[in-house]
Amino acid sequence: MRDLWLSPERLFDGTRLHEGTGLRLAGGMVAEIGPAPAGARHIAGVVTPGYVDLQVNGGGGVLLNTSPTVEGMDTIAAAHRRLGTVALLPTLITDAPEVLDRAAGAALEARGREGILGLHIEGPHIAPARRGTHAPRFIRPLDPRTIDTVRRLRAGGVRVMITLAPEAAEAGQIAELRAAGAVVSLGHTDASYEAANAALAEGANCFTHLFNAMSPLSHRAPGVAGAALNSRVPVGIICDGVHVADDVVALAIRARPAPDLMFAVSDAMPTVGGPERFRLYDMELQVRDGMLVNPEGSLAGAHVTMAESVARLVDKVGVAPETALRMAVTVPARVMDAPELARLEGRAARDVLTLGPDWRVTGNLADLAD
């Protein structure tokens, strides 16, 4: 791959959108950022680090729960890479303990593989009343087995996010998970505002898909949604126009007490980059009118990409492009202590996206340098 100076219309460096800034490719890597010399190749649109997604149940026709293997994770990561997501957390939803054991073993084996950032354990330690599509037969309180699994993953260098309900944990267990180095995200919970704040005080440091599967915000009972908005920890949100109305996404972003406390997640299922039907537990889910639904027609997971989420944040929600990009790159990278994913210098050319004027992914820098 030849050395090449590029001059994009705009360049996002993980912090700011710049105009008039170029970058030099050398040996398939971004070697330098600075003023582009005369003769640099012009690129229409935006150059940005690839997207980081912390909640990906599946992709390319594969669901992690049914394929908790390295091969399954590779297939999911490859499907999302084609759509602009270069790093993700394969996400295991509520299932039998043996399935978590297999997924943990796969995550340890997959450490360092392209696109696989770690493991997100979403359940089974959740509230039955807020389970969503999670199978009730597998829901159980947080136990030493899961805590030991998290410790084993962290000892093996695997990043871990675990979504749980405060009411499913005993006093001190959240602190144990945090001491092990996991990101503890509150979700699938019917807890009160006070209970959510108590979990934050014990060390919980994130919230899972704001508004969905959590006690709602009302004017007399703020619930977990209110605790999330009022907290100073990062909060994930699904930006597909279905799980949360666009105007509510905009309201939530404005309501946070500081910048960079919101990040986008896809919560994607196998239909992203794959067939429009798949099986979850003992039911078939399918895409209908752009939504993923169960046989009764109820919403049952997400069918959206991070690239589509960024475009929607800009075009429909009305947030500044820089904010949208930070929600898809910078904040999730920081949540998982992977700041290198929000930088351009030193990145492989194929990890850096080109975006068109409609904010859709048009390719990556490796396409330009070949």
Image (cartoon, grey):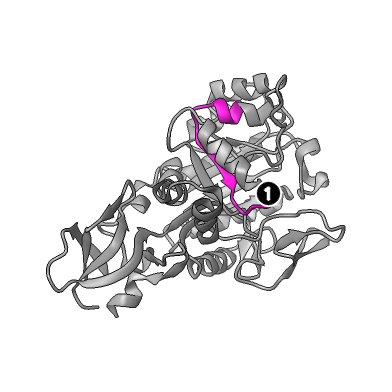
Question: Which residue is pictured at 22% across the width and 58% down the height?
Answer: 21
Q: Is residue 254 above or below residue 133?
A: above
Question: Which residue is pictured at 47% across the width and 65% down the height?
Answer: 360
Based on the displayed image, in which of its 4 quarters is residue 235 positioned? top right
* Mark 1 nearby-residue class (10 Å; few <14, some 14–19, many ≥20): some
Based on the displayed image, in which of its 4 quarters is residue 356 positioned? bottom left
The image quadrant where one finds the C terminus is bottom left
List x then y, in percent, for residue 334. 41, 42
Q: Is residue 347 visible?
A: yes
**Outermost left residue:** 38
Query: Magenta segment range?
Result: 227-244
Question: Which residue is pictured at 73% across the width and 60% down the height?
Answer: 292
Magenta residue check for 163:
no
- The residue that label 1 is drawn on is 243
Q: Is residue 334 above or below residue 110?
A: above
**Front-most of 200 and 303?**
303
Q: Is residue 209 visible?
A: no
List x then y, in percent, for residue 265. 56, 50
Q: Is residue 113 above or below residue 276?
A: above
Q: Secondary structure at mark 1?
A: loop
List x then y, in percent, for residue 219. 70, 22
The tally of labels here is 1
Magenta residue check for 240:
yes
